Amino acid sequence: MKNVIVSLAGECSISRDQLEKYDFVVGVDSGTDYLYKLFLIPNLIIGDLDSINSKTLDRAKKDNAEIINYEVDKDKTDFELALDYLKINNAKNITIIGGESGEVDHFFGNLLSISAFHKKENIEWKQSNQNIIFPNTELIKTEGGKVFSLIPLSNLNGVSINGARWNIKNENIQYGSSKTLRNITNSDVLKVRVDSGKYCLIIQN
């Protein structure tokens, strides 16, 4: 799988012109509804299917989508099951949409699921006003004047940032530190190097 998009339940603020072409399209339960609104045809629908619109499900069946249905009582979320599927199928470039509203534990659960899954993949959780990025490269394409934050999700060693108003070189950032929050890009390429540790970038659109 080269270029995958995964649509989650919950608010989806993204517009079609903010998306690309995708080789594989995944609807996570009722997140499938957004795919059709964005003129994307699902290849796969996965989850317990307790909230998907019945008309959407019927349409997906007519479009020959693969449907993997789980029991409602399970020890993983529908999104985790989707990530398991992507791991088995070696997805490397993953775009995520939806999942922007609802109870706060859902948002943080999704964020931490991505963090636990992320190894060498490039993952972008796209929203209308910002992208949450788990990169697989040091070079991040952006624009000058964009507010961004590097969020440490563990202790970070050897952090360097170039292409920003406040660059840093080979520093250790402790989990919970605010030092790498609310920076500003000053070029169209942001270079971020982290020798070890888990992190994500939040970049304003």
Image: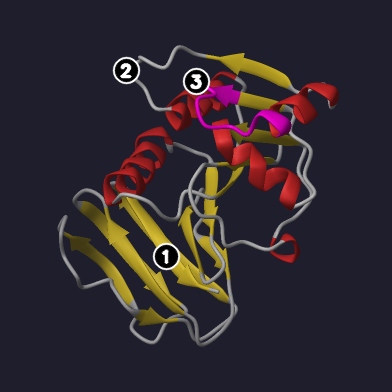
Q: In which quadrant of the rendered image does the N terminus lie?
A: top right
* Residue of label 2: 75
Work out whether residue 128 or residue 139 is closer to the camera in this orientation and state it. Answer: 128
Quadrant placement of the C terminus: bottom right
Q: Position of residue 156 (x, y in %)?
A: 23, 53
Local SS, label 2: loop
In the rendered structure, find residue 202 and report the number of the disc placed on it: 1
First of labels 2, 1 by sequence position: 2
Name the amino acid, label 2: Asp
Q: Looking at the picture, tell me which residue is in the foreground, 147 or 44.
A: 44
| Residue under pointer 3 | 48
Q: Which mark is residue 79?
A: none
Q: Position of residue 171 (x, y in %)?
A: 22, 65
Mark 2 or 1, which is nearer the eye?
A: 2
Q: Residue at x 43, y 75 (%)?
A: 162
- Mark 2 or 3 closer to N-term? 3
Label 3: state its secondary structure: loop
- How far apart marks 2 and 1 lie (CA) works out to 29 Å
Depth check, mark 3 against mark 1: the one in front is 3
Q: Give, as a single range, the part of the protein colored magenta.
A: 46-55
130 relative to 42 in the view: left or right: left
Mark 3 → mark 1, Cα distance in angstroms: 30 Å
How far apart are labels 2 and 3 at the CA level?
12 Å
2 and 1 marks in contact (CB < 8 Å): no
Q: Label 3 amino acid?
A: Asp
| Dominant SS in magenta | loop
Q: Is residue 34 above or below residue 90?
A: below
Q: Going 41% across and 74% down the picture, which residue do you hit?
A: 148
